[in-house]
Image (cartoon, helix red, strand yellow):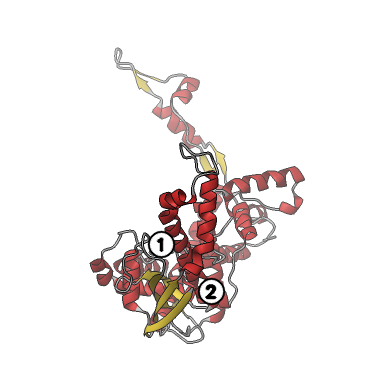
């Protein structure tokens, strides 16, 4: 078997696979012998069917299967051995490939177009003018939270005013006499439910302990500080979403990365199951290209900085965030086993596991960005941030022409080149279990 390549552009190759009888004859003979041994043809005893008849009946199909297998294995092996970092997957070259006649041919040539991943440098260490919004936590917010929390932990009481209101609502007028009568209290209490009045909890160490167990908060001032810190953390989770989007946009914009555009346009059409026409790809190619660039950047960062998500981390996420498991060290063995059994059930839901896996990857990516990049803090009110986030969301939708175009692959990057020669560009964070 002979494999050669020639450059057809800065980031494209033409790969030629030549197959001769010596490459497949032995395998063909073995296949035919197996068919002869297993075939059940009326008029012949099993294992005694003439070889010529087997070849006539099955030879063409066996040859086609073996040649296709050789093509697939050759592509995988060559790309692996030559360490080619390709984009998408090899595409048959329609101009050079001719019709195959398995009836009369014994030598074959196949041509494939390959797109190559470009060299690029990620400007992680540069100031990309990325704003990191910080929502200011004012006293009004804190007062409102404390007021609501005091009610939530308050004691329900029935005041005299409530009882009087219930009795008043219970007065009825006799239509016959026109005189007002007051029904017995017990009867009217059954007819008219009394809403309890909540007496807010007092701001004392006992209340502070109920809200923040184990923090040993003793004063109102320390309690307010804790509330402020918690609110800031909660807001940070929201602002991180916008920050992540800003980071990806800035990195894509500032990373010089040429792409084999014509190859990718063709690949997008052929690998989306008719989802897009060539005209639609052409119209929206800028967005597709930006998505491709981000996938390449993200995969490079994951590799270079060992940003991995383990199965154990996914299981722990389920235990803590979904099952609310706490103090696992203090649990009885039976309870631990019960939790593990429940987690096993969760792990069988592949869509759910993928969502968790992606979330953990994003969290690790965000931690890396915060440790490696320069941001410009900008304090804003909650109301202003909502406006900013809304504008950004609308902007994303204006440019979001299916940015993820379905990069389905394995977390361990063990690609099946028979179907999808995606290489590292398509990690998609998915986990194999």
**Residue 195 place in picture, x, y as percent:** 47, 36
Look at the image and tell me in which quarter the C terminus lies. Answer: bottom right
Instruction: Please tell me which of labels 2 and 1 falls first in the chain.
Output: 2
Q: Where does the image place residue 394, in percent across and percent down from the top left?
A: 31, 66
* Residue 39 disc label: none
Residue 138 visible, this angle: no
**Residue annotated with mark 1:** 406
Give SS at disc 1. loop
Residue 67, located in which quarter of the rendered image?
bottom left
Q: Residue at x 53, y 36 (%)?
A: 158
Q: Is residue 293 above or below residue 223?
A: below
Q: Is mark 2 on a helix, strand or loop?
A: helix
Residue at 44%, 80% (x, y): give it. Answer: 4
* Neighbourhood count class around disc 2 (C-alpha, 10 Å): few under 14, some 14–19, many 20 upward: few
Question: In this view of the protein, which residue sits in the foreground, 99 or 168?
Answer: 99
| 180 versus 58 height, above or below | above
Q: Is residue 418 left or right of residue 174?
A: right
Q: Nearer the viewer, mark 2 or mark 1?
A: 2
The answer to whether residue 313 shows anywhere in this view is: yes
Q: How crowded is mark 1: few (under 14 residues within 10 Å), some or many (20 or more)?
A: few
Question: Furthest residue to the left?
Answer: 279
**What residue sits right under mark 2 in the picture?**
80
Q: Residue at x 44, y 24 (%)?
A: 191
Q: Nearer the viewer, residue 293 or 134?
A: 293
- Could you say which quadrant of the image residue 245 lies in? bottom left
Q: How far is mark 2 from mark 1, CA to CA?
A: 24 Å
Q: Is residue 279 left or right of residue 190?
A: left
Which x, y percent locates residue 88?
Answer: 41, 70
Say above or below: 15 vs 41.
below
């Amino acid at each position: 078997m002979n494999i050669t390549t020639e450059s057809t552009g800065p980031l494209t190759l033409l790969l030629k696979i030549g197959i001769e009888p010596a490459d497949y004859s032995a395998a063909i003979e073995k296949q035919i012998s197996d068919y002869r041994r297993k075939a059940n043809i009326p008029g012949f005893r099993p294992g005694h069917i003439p070889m010529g008849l087997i070849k006539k009946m099955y030879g063409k199909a066996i040859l086609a299967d073996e040649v296709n297998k050789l093509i697939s294995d050759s592509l995988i092996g060559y790309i692996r051995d030559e360490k080619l970092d390709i984009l998408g997957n090899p595409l048959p070259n329609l101009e050079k490939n001719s019709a195959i006649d398995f009836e009369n041919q014994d030598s074959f040539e196949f041509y494939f177009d390959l797109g190559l991943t470009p060299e690029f440098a990620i400007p992680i260490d540069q100031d990309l003018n990325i704003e990191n919004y910080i929502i200011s936590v004012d006293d009004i917010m804190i007062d409102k939270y404390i007021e609501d929390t005091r009610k939530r932990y308050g004691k329900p009481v029935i005041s005299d005013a409530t009882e009087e209101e219930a009795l008043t609502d219970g007065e009825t007028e006799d239509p016959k006499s026109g005189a007002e009568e007051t029904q017995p209290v017990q009867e009217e209490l059954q007819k008219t439910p009394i809403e309890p009045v909540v007496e807010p909890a007092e701001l004392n160490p006992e209340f502070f302990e109920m809200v923040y167990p184990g923090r040993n908060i003793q004063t109102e001032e320390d309690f307010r500080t804790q509330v402020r810190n918690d609110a800031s953390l909660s807001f940070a989770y929201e602002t991180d979403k916008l920050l992540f989007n800003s980071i990806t946009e800035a990195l894509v914009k500032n990373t010089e990365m040429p792409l084999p555009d014509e190859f990718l346009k063709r690949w997008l059409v052929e690998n989306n199951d008719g989802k897009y026409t060539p005209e639609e790809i052409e119209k929206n190619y800028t967005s597709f290209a930006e998505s491709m660039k981000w996938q390449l950047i993200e995969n490079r960062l994951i590799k270079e900085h060992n940003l991995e998500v383990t199965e154990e981390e996914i299981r722990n996420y389920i235990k803590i965030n979904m099952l609310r498991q706490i103090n696992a060290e203090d649990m009885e063995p039976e309870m631990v086993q019960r939790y593990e059994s429940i987690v096993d059930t969760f792990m069988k839901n592949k869509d759910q596991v993928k969502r968790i896996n992606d979330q953990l990857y994003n969290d690790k990516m965000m931690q890396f960005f915060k440790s490696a990049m320069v941001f410009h803090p900008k304090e804003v009110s909650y109301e202003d941030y909502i406006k900013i986030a809304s504008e950004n969301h609308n902007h994303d939708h204006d440019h979001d022409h299916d940015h993820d175009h379905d990069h389905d692959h394995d977390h361990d990057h063990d690609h099946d080149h028979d179907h999808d020669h995606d290489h590292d560009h398509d990690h998609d964070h998915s986990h194999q279990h």
